Structures are given as C-alpha cells and as structure tokens.
Image (cartoon, rainbow, N blue to C red):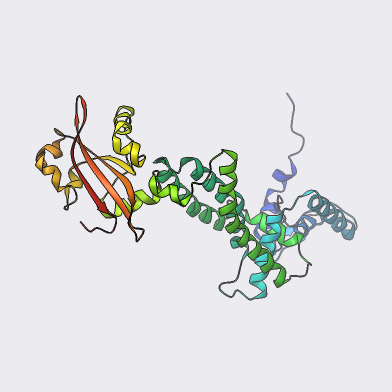
C-alpha cells in the first residue's frame, strides 16, 4: 500500500489559489483559471490587495518567471485558431467602443447573429422549405425555426453559444489592430446583401438539382397546385384547415372530374361543429342537422379548387361538399365564389 508523501499543489495551496481567484482584476485567457499576472504572484509570492500573503514557490529572478509565463501564454495563443466570425465579433465590439455605445450601431452579438442567419439558419430553412413546402409538417417546422431564433438569441446573450472567455481571448488577440469604421460597415452590408441573395439563389439551385422547373405564368392560371399562400388566404376567409386525407379518401378525390380539370384541391378538410358558423357552409343544413354534424353521425368532406381568375386577377374558387358514406363520397353541394367574397 503506497503512502502519499506530499499533497498535490492545488490541494496544499488551495487557500492561496482561492484568494488569488477572488482578488483577480486582470483579464483571464481562454482555458486559464487565473491571469498570467496572478500565476507569477502564485509562483513568486507576494501580498494581495486584501492583505493575504502568498508564499513563494520559486526563489529567483522575478523577471525570468514573468518571461516564462508570458512565453507559455503566447505559445498557447499561437496554437489557438481564430476564424472569420471571431474577426466580425471584434469589429462589432470595436464599433460600439468607437461610437460610444450609440444605438443602431452594430455590436459583436449582432455580427454573430448575422453569421448564424446566413451560414446556418437560412440554408436549413430554405432547404427544408423546398422539400416540405406542400406538407402540413412545414407549418410545425416554421414554428420550430421561429422558436429556434428566440433560443439562439437567449443563449448568445448568456454566453452559452459564444462563451465570454472566447470573447475576451478574441479581443486580446486583435488588441493593437487599428479599427476601421469603413471596413466594419463594408462587412456588415456585404453580409446583408449575401443574406438577400441566398434567399433567391439557394431555392433556384435546389430546383435545378432535383429537376423542378418553374411553370409559365399562363399555365399556373389553368392548373394551380396546392400552395401555402392559397391555403392561408382561405383559412382567413372561410376558416379552412389543412388536413391530410387518408389514402382511400385521396383516391376518391383524385377520381373527381374537378380534380382532373383544375388540379389538386387547395385544401381538404372534414366539416366539424366549429366550422358551421357563418353562411359559407349553411347549405349543409339541408342534408343534416347541426346535432348530426356535431356528434359525427353524418360526416361531410370539403374540398376547394382554384378554378381560374377574373379579369382583375381575382381568384375564382370552387368548393364542393361530399357526404361520407360506406360506398364512397356522395356530392351534396357546391359553391363557386371569388376570394373577395364576404361570408
């Protein structure tokens, strides 16, 4: 059984280390627990501002110890890598100092957020939107991305995404460099332009990769596919909901002559109790009572197609209602209307 002859330095001089950290006033490099000045005091000994005395561990020339600690720090600094976003953070922080904290001036966190939007957020959002745009999953994905922005802002301000130790190391690394307001705003506006260009170029590139081509304007007026903007307008006008029909129901809808003529409906939904307010679906009460619709004893499916456009470019819509029976769908009512109609 081995016997411990001497405690480790961090245990033997734990009190001194605690006092040095408590009285620290100098910047602490990244991955260090004390500043280089405090390290020299710990090794050479000295009296702190609160009167606590640190015992010397090395007897010799203090200047040699300062050179040794500074050399070790510079060597670690040389091995540490700095990236473009670090430089942008420094530009933002220096802009705040240069303009003495004036509002509407860039700062380090805003420059970092701009980088996150361009190189992480926008590519993920636009790529996912390209493939899921016609799906109901896209609604939840959009909500998740908005919540993600709020979370990023929160963690960025708390130093969890870009730690405060990293920020101090960046400021020390670029210390002594001359700040140029022109360079700061050049990068700021260039990144803003890149973000706008990305919104156009990335979807266009994805369409070329997967072979999709934009339809001519003339064709889009004769056969309009399901689009989020179409559904959203109908949701506001007549309370439409986007529901995913079953395979059997989708098959029956595809067999309908209106689908073959006008394309897929903008939305498909089952009429429920809360949908019976207003005049839009009042015709269903000729085929079932309100109680029958409420308890589900009689079920109706509602489909809406874009039939065409008026000379004033207002969409002409065709809504059909079907009663769900064991044998299939039975048409019970239909209504042709324009999107500027009030119900």
The residue under the point 24% across, 58% down is: 341
Of 316 and 154, which appears nearest the observer? 316
> Is residue 339 among the parts visible in the rendering?
yes
Of 18 and 271, which appears nearest the observer? 271
The percent coordinates of residue 252 (x first, y second) are: 29, 30
Residue 70 occupies which quadrant of the picture? bottom right
- Quadrant in which the N terminus is drawn: top right
The residue under the point 75% across, 44% down is: 9
Total number of numbered discs in the rendering: 0
The residue under the point 60% across, 74% down is: 101
The answer to whether residue 56 is left or right of residue 19 is right
The percent coordinates of residue 261 (x first, y second) are: 34, 39
The percent coordinates of residue 331 (x first, y second) are: 19, 36
Residue 3 occupies which quadrant of the picture? top right
As displayed, is residue 334 above or below residue 316?
A: above
As displayed, is residue 276 above or below residue 67?
A: above
The answer to whether residue 2 is left or right of residue 219 is right
Of 184 and 301, which appears nearest the observer? 301
The percent coordinates of residue 213 (x first, y second) are: 53, 43
- Quadrant in which the C terminus is drawn: bottom left
């Amino acid at each position: 059984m081995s016997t411990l002859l001497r405690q480790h330095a961090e245990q033997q001089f734990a009190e001194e280390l605690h006092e040095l950290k408590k009285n620290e006033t100098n910047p602490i490099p990244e991955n260090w627990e004390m500043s280089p000045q405090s390290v020299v005091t710990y090794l050479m000994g000295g009296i702190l501002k609160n009167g606590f005395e640190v015992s010397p561990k090395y007897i010799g020339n203090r200047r040699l110890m300062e050179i040794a600690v500074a050399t070790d720090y510079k060597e670690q600094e040389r091995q540490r890598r700095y990236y473009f976003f670090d430089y942008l953070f420094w530009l933002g922080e220096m802009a705040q100092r240069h303009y003495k904290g004036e509002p509407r001036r860039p700062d380090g966190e805003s420059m970092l957020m701009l980088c996150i939007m361009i190189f992480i957020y926008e590519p993920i959002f636009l790529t996912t939107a390209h493939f899921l745009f016609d799906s109901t999953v896209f609604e939840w994905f959009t909500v998740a991305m908005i919540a993600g922005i709020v979370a990023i802002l929160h963690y960025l301000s708390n130093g969890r995404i870009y730690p405060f130790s990293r920020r101090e190391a960046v400021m020390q690394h670029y210390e002594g460099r001359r700040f140029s307001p022109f360079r700061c705003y050049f990068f700021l506006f260039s990144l803003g332009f890149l973000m706008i260009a990305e919104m156009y170029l990335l979807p266009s590139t994805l369409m070329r990769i997967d072979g999709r081509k934009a339809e001519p304007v003339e064709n889009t007026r004769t056969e309009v596919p399901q689009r989020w903007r179409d559904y959203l307008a109908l949701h506001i006008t007549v309370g439409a909901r986007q529901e995913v029909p079953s395979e059997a129901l989708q098959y029956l809808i595809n067999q309908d002559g209106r689908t073959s003529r006008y394309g897929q409906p903008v939305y498909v939904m089952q009429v429920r109790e809360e949908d019976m307010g207003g005049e839009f679906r009042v015709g269903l009460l000729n085929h079932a009572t309100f109680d029958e619709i409420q308890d589900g004893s009689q079920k109706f499916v509602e489909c809406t197609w874009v039939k065409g456009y008026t000379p004033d470019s207002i969409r002409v819509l065709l809504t059909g209602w079907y009663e769900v029976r064991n044998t299939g769908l039975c048409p019970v009512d239909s209504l042709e209307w324009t999107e500027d109609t009030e119900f």
